[in-house]
Image (cartoon, rainbow, N blue to C red):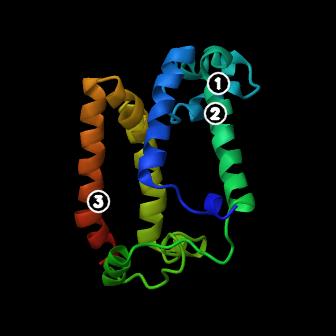
Amino acid sequence: MEMLSQTWPWYVAGPLIGLVVPLLLVVGGKVFGVSANLRHMCAALPAPDRLKPAFLRYDWKGSGLWNLVFVLGVAVGGFLAVTLLGTPDVGASISEATRTDLLALGLTDLSGMVPSEIFSWGALASPAALLMVVGGGFLVGFGARYAGGCTSGHAISGLADLQLPSLVAVLGFFAGGLLVTFVLLPLILG
C-alpha cells in the first residue's frame, strides 16, 4: 500500500497515458478528449427536441455514451485514489520556485495546491479573483469549443495522429499559457 500512495514517475505514467490513444483507436475508433462531454450531458437532458437547439439534437448515446462513462470513471477513480490511496499526513505541495513566484505576486496562503486568496468562495468577492475564475472558465470553455477540442484531446490524440490543426492548437495553448503567466497574471494581481 505504501507504493500506491506515492506519485508514479513520469516514465511509468507517460507511457500508460500514451497507450490510451492507440487502444481507443484500435478498439472502437474513438478519440481521447473530454471537452465534448458538456454537449453530451446537455443533449441527454430529458427535454423535447423542439425545445433543444439544433446543436444538441443528435444521437448522444451512439456518439457520446462511451465518453460519458469514461469521464465518470475518471471521477470515480480520482475519488478512490484520494479516499483509499491518499496519505492524510502528506499534503499536496508545490515547488519552492512556484511558491516564491506566488509570494512575489502578493499571494500569501500557499498551504494547498491553489492559493485560497483566489480560489475560494470568499475570494470571488474580489474583482481580480472573479475575473480569473469566471472569465478564465469562460475563455477555457470557449477556446476548447473554438479549437475543436480540449488540451488533452489535441495534445494526446491529435498529435499522436499527426494532425496539423492539433499542433497549431497545442502551440496556441502553450503561447496563451505563457502570456497569461508572465503578462496577464502579474497585471491582474499587481
- Residue at 32% x, 76% y is 97
Point out residue 88 in the picture as x, y percentages from the top left corner.
Answer: 69, 73
- Residue at 51% x, 70% y is 113
Point out residue 72 in the picture as x, y percentages from the top left corner.
Answer: 68, 39
Query: Decide: marks 1, 2 in contact (CB < 8 A)?
Result: yes
- Residue at 47% x, 65% y is 130
Point out residue 182 in the picture as x, y percentages from the top left corner.
Answer: 24, 65
Relative to 134, residue 114 above or below: below
Point out residue 185 in the picture as x, y percentages from the top left corner.
Answer: 31, 67
Checking the image for residue 180, the label placed there is 3
Is 94 placed left or right of 34 in the picture? left
Q: Distance between the residues labelled 3 and 2?
A: 31 Å
Is 125 placed left or right of 150 in the picture? right
* Quadrant in which the N terminus appears: bottom right
Which residue is identified by label 2?
70
Mark 2 belongs to which amino acid? Phe
Front residue (pair 116, 187):
116
Q: How crowded is mark 3: few (under 14 residues within 10 Å), some or many (20 or more)?
A: some
**Quick one: label 3 or label 2, which is nearer the N terminus?**
2
Which residue is identified by label 1?
66
* Quadrant in which the C terminus appears: bottom left
